[in-house]
Image: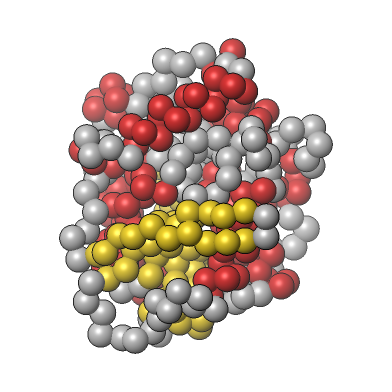
């Protein structure tokens, strides 16, 4: 039987909001409050302090019809003139979240790999439903591979990282890049949402872990309602439903044993392997949804970070 989540996680991550009752306007207001808290210095106690060996800057990138903000992590001292590029996509169910919530992981990868890690503030629902987020991420990646800012990007060493809903986006970016480029050489997916279709609640881990902190089922339902409205085919944004998952970059899928999304990550790993793509799945004990971005609460965040670093070294620093 799985253990229980650490007491601090149960106290701090407990969701008391009635998500099923909130309106679109209330979601926007909730987002502003949540993101303000996540970006605060006080939140670093939970989300972790950035690696001091990394320089963090914000840049703007102009894409057709919009301007997006990039949060860029670069090593202060890098011996190589060319560095791998990692596109990082935060979680939040497509309705909340911001790049700063992953500073702990992103800055460490930038310093230790070393690499240029860019987290994109993709547009959010309900104002911008799917697949807007995939368009933002893919077009950003396609531009950055050309090194428009002169950072020293190595186009032969490109990876995507996605957490939760960001994992959904990362998988769909990899699928689009398989056909249209640019080449992606590795993908890291942390407890990704891989099924947003009518079967999304059929996985055993939903019933087993739906009451655990980190991801409330109410928030999950609200994310689906707002980000994937009736005008969007949910199977088209569900990577586990894709017809063919062959010839995709090697994947590391990291999940927690107490996460409602556990079996979605497991199912995607199985589909990748069945279609001939390399995939490694690691299940971390006593870890809930979002654990990598809450190292102050969940000890498993640290060994997971080490595994992610070694996986990326293996595939980007050959």
Residue in front for this viewpoint, 140 or 191: 140
Q: Is residue 267 visible?
A: no
**Considering the image in quadrants, where does the N terminus appear?**
top left
For residue 205, above or below residue 48: above
Q: Position of residue 237 (x, y in %)?
A: 70, 47
**Considering the image in quadrants, where does the C terminus appear?**
bottom left
Image position of 258 (left or right of 261): left
Image position of 17 (left or right of 306): right
Q: Position of residue 37 (x, y in %)?
A: 33, 32
Q: Residue at x 38, y 62 (%)?
A: 72
Q: Is residue 16 visible?
A: yes
The count of marks equals: 0
Q: Residue furthest left?
A: 52
Q: Position of residue 174 (x, y in %)?
A: 62, 64
Q: Residue at x 51, y 14 (%)?
A: 18
Residue 11 falls in image quadrant:
top left
What colouring style does the render use?
A: secondary structure
Q: Residue at x 66, y 74 (%)?
A: 181
For residue 95, above or below residue 112: above
Residue 16 falls in image quadrant:
top left
Q: Residue at x 55, y 49 (%)?
A: 122
Image position of 159 (left or right of 274): left
For residue 318, above or below residue 85: below
Q: Position of residue 119 (x, y in %)?
A: 44, 57
Residue in front for this viewpoint, 98 or 183: 98
Residue 199 falls in image quadrant:
top right
Residue in front for this viewpoint, 300 or 151: 151
């Amino acid at each position: 039987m799985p253990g229980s989540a650490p007491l601090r996680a149960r106290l701090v991550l407990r969701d008391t909001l009635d998500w099923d009752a909130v309106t679109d306007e209330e979601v926007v207001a909730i987002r502003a409050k949540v993101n303000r808290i996540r970006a605060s210095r006080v939140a670093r106690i939970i989300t972790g302090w950035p690696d001091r060996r990394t320089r963090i800057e914000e840049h703007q990138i102009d894409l057709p019809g919009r301007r997006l903000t990039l949060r860029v992590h670069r090593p202060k001292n890098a011996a190589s003139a060319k560095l791998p590029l990692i596109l990082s996509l935060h979680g939040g169910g497509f309705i909340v979240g911001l790049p700063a919530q992953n500073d702990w992981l992103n800055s460490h990868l930038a310093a230790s790999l070393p690499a240029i890690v860019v987290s994109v503030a993709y547009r959010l629902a309900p104002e911008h439903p799917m697949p807007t987020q995939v368009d933002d991420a893919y077009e950003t990646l396609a531009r950055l591979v050309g090194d428009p800012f002169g950072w020293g990007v190595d186009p032969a060493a490109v990876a995507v990282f996605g957490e939760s809903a960001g994992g959904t986006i990362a998988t769909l970016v990899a699928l689009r890049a398989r056909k249209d480029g640019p080449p992606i050489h590795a993908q890291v997916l942390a407890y990704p949402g891989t099924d947003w279709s009518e079967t999304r609640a059929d996985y055993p881990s939903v019933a087993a872990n739906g009451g655990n902190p980190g991801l409330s089922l109410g928030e999950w339902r609200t994310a689906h309602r707002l980000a994937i409205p009736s005008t969007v085919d949910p199977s088209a944004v569900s990577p586990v439903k894709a017809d063919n998952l062959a010839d995709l970059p090697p994947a590391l899928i990291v999940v927690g044993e107490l996460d409602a999304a556990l079996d979605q990550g497991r199912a995607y790993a199985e589909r990748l392997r069945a279609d001939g793509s390399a995939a490694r799945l690691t299940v971390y004990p006593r870890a809930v949804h979002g654990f990598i971005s809450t190292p102050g609460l969940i000890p498993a965040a640290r060994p997971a970070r080490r595994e992610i670093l070694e996986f990326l070294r293996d595939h980007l620093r050959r």
